[in-house]
Amino acid sequence: MDETLVNSLYIFLLAGFVGFGAITRVPPLLHTPLMSATNAISAISVVGALQAAGSGHDIVSSVLGGIAVSCAMTNVVGGFLITNRMLKMFQKGPSAPNKGGGHR
């Protein structure tokens, strides 16, 4: 195996273990801010995927880059939709109108 491939796989596995360890220790109260942060990270991965798709090395890199772009964009859009829905749960609804006509 190529040394670069082995190093890349090693970094990928370490990142997976660190990410899993960090996510499992997050309390539920911090889930929404963490979701917004991961959306930003996913947006950065879209840029990398676009670079891979448009590198023009060969057809395989273009196809895999295109798949990476669609997966990353699905993650970004879905993450923002879920975050928006969660934030709406914490908003106060419209207040009831005062039926008495005056202040008490």
Image (tube, rainbow, N blue to C red):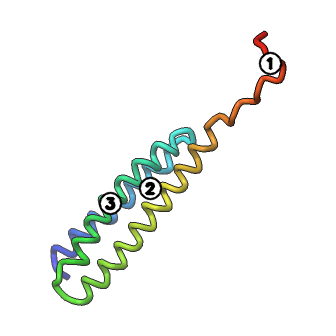
Residue 103 quadrant: top right
- Which residue is pictured at 58% across the width and 47% down the height? 86
Label 2 belongs to which residue?
Answer: 20
The span from disc 3 to disc 1 (Cα, nearest Å) is: 65 Å
Chain-order first, disc 3 or disc 1: 3
Task: Find the residue positioned furthest to the front.
Answer: 101
In the picture, residue 50 is in which quadrant? bottom left
Residue ID for mark 1: 101
Q: Residues within 10 Å of mark 1 (few under 14, many from 20)?
A: few
The disc placed on residue 19 is none
Amino acid of disc 1: Gly
**Secondary element at image label 3:** helix
Crowd rating for badge 2 (residues with CA inside 10 Å; few <14, some 14–19, many 20+): few
Task: Report the residue at 35% width, 74% height from top.
Answer: 68
Q: Which residue is mark 3?
A: 14
Q: Nearer the viewer, mark 3 or mark 1?
A: 1
Viewer-side residue, 97 vs 43: 97
Label 3 packing within 10 angstroms: few (<14), some (14-19), many (20+): few
Could you tell me the amino acid type at mark 3?
Leu
Which secondary structure, mark 2?
Answer: helix
Q: Nearer the viewer, mark 2 or mark 1?
A: 1
Q: Amino acid at mark 2?
A: Phe
Query: Of all residues shown, which one is farthest toward the bottom?
Result: 59
